[in-house]
Image (spheres, helix red, strand yellow):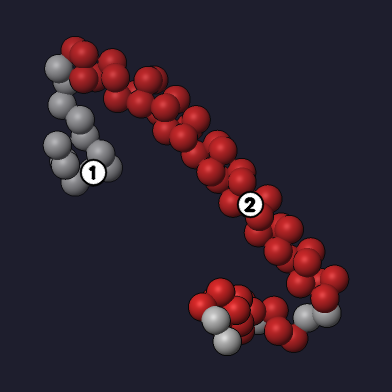
């Protein structure tokens, strides 16, 4: 067993995919890939949007940045 097949086996056992039929396993993997694509595609866009609309104006004016209620600067 090489390294890749060990990782695939670990993924199947960890996620419980070993007990599914082949078509259910493919459907689950497609859903995982779509979810990862969505997070990787929209994550940087929302981070840039958050920076430009919330953080950048405060950094330019010199206001203190308060995250949550803890007073973290």
Instruction: Give the position of the C terminus as an image quadrant.
Output: top left
Tell me: 24 left or right of 9. Answer: right
3D distance between C-alphas at marks 2 and 1: 32 Å
Mark 2, secondary structure of its residue: helix
Q: Is residue 72 visible?
A: yes
Asked whether 49 or 17 is in front, the reply is 17
Q: Residues within 10 Å of mark 1 (few under 14, many from 20)?
A: few
Asked whether 32 or 56 is in front, the reply is 32
Instruction: Give the position of the N terminus as an image quadrant.
Output: bottom right
Residue 29 image offset from top left, x and y in percent: 70, 64
Q: Picture quarter containing residue 28?
A: bottom right
**Disc number placed over residue 32 in the picture, else none:** none
Residue 24 image offset from top left, x and y in percent: 81, 72
Q: Picture quarter containing residue 19?
A: bottom right
Q: Give me the residue at 42% from left, 33% from top.
A: 47
Tell me: 59 left or right of 52. Answer: left
Whether 47 is drawn above or below 13: the answer is above
Mark 2 or 1, nearer chain start = 2
Q: Give me the residue at 23% from left, 43% from top.
A: 69
Mark 1, secondary structure of its residue: loop
Q: Give the farthest residue toward the front.
A: 2
Residue of label 1: 69
Q: Give me the residue at 44% from left, 25% from top.
A: 49
Residue of label 2: 35
Asked whether 59 or 65 is in front, the reply is 59
């Amino acid at each position: 067993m090489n390294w890749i097949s060990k990782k695939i086996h670990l993924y199947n056992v960890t996620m419980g995919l070993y007990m599914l039929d082949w078509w259910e396993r493919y459907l689950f993997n497609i859903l995982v890939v779509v979810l990862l694509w969505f997070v990787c595609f929209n994550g940087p866009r929302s981070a840039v949007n958050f920076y430009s609309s919330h953080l950048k104006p405060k950094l330019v004016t010199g206001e203190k940045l308060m995250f949550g209620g803890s007073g973290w600067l």
